Amino acid sequence: MEHEIQDQGGCVIVSLKGDVDLQNSPEARTILLACVERSLPVLVDLSAINYIDSSGVASLVESLQTARKKGTTLILVAVSDGAMRVLQLARLDKVFTICDTIDDALKEIG
């Protein structure tokens, strides 16, 4: 798994690439929670995710819960088809705010 972190428009944009599985999910969790700790809205770009398993989904859920506790926002952006199928199977597509583009997510934040 590769990642990139950018600051844009008062938000933190985390782009994940590759597989978020049992091997890589601890790294993803650490990255996401560190970004959430900044108390800025976090946009998680999942457009380049090939595969995500339950451990990867758990990292996303924990990050969302932490963001809510801190009074900030976590939005999933450009979710790949494979990742979206996993989120839909777990019915998490109804829990997360999901936007098609970074611009849409920035508008969602206001």
Image: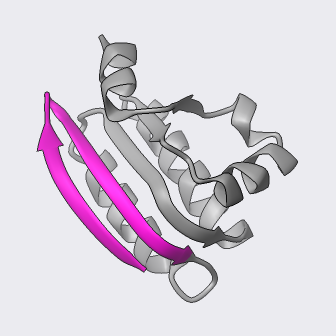
Relative to 80, residue 28 above or below? below
Front-most of residues 68 and 89 = 89
Relative to 2, residue 12 above or below? above
**How many marks overall?**
0
Find residue 2 and report its image quarter.
bottom left
Q: Is residue 69 left or right of residue 65?
A: left
In this picture the colour scheme is one colour
Q: Is residue 46 left or right of residue 57?
A: left
Residue at 40% in and 33% down = 101
Q: Give the residue at the far top of this rendering.
A: 110
Question: Could you tell me if residue 59 is visible in this image?
Answer: yes
Q: Give the residue at the far bottom of this rendering.
A: 23
Front-most of residues 71 and 14 = 14
Give residue 109's position: percent from left, percent from top: 34, 17
Q: Is residue 5 magenta?
A: yes
Dominant SS type (magenta): strand
Residue at 42% in and 38% down = 67
Find residue 110 and report its image quarter.
top left
Question: Could you tell me if residue 71 is visible in this image?
Answer: no
Q: Which residues are magenta?
A: 1-19
Residue at 63% in and 83% down = 22
Q: Is residue 58 magenta?
A: no
Give residue 43's position: percent from left, percent from top: 36, 40
Relative to 3, residue 24 above or below? below
Quarter that holds the N terminus: bottom left
Residue at 14% in and 37% down = 8
Give residue 10's position: percent from left, percent from top: 14, 29
Give residue 38's position: percent from left, percent from top: 21, 45
Relative to 75, residue 57 above or below? below
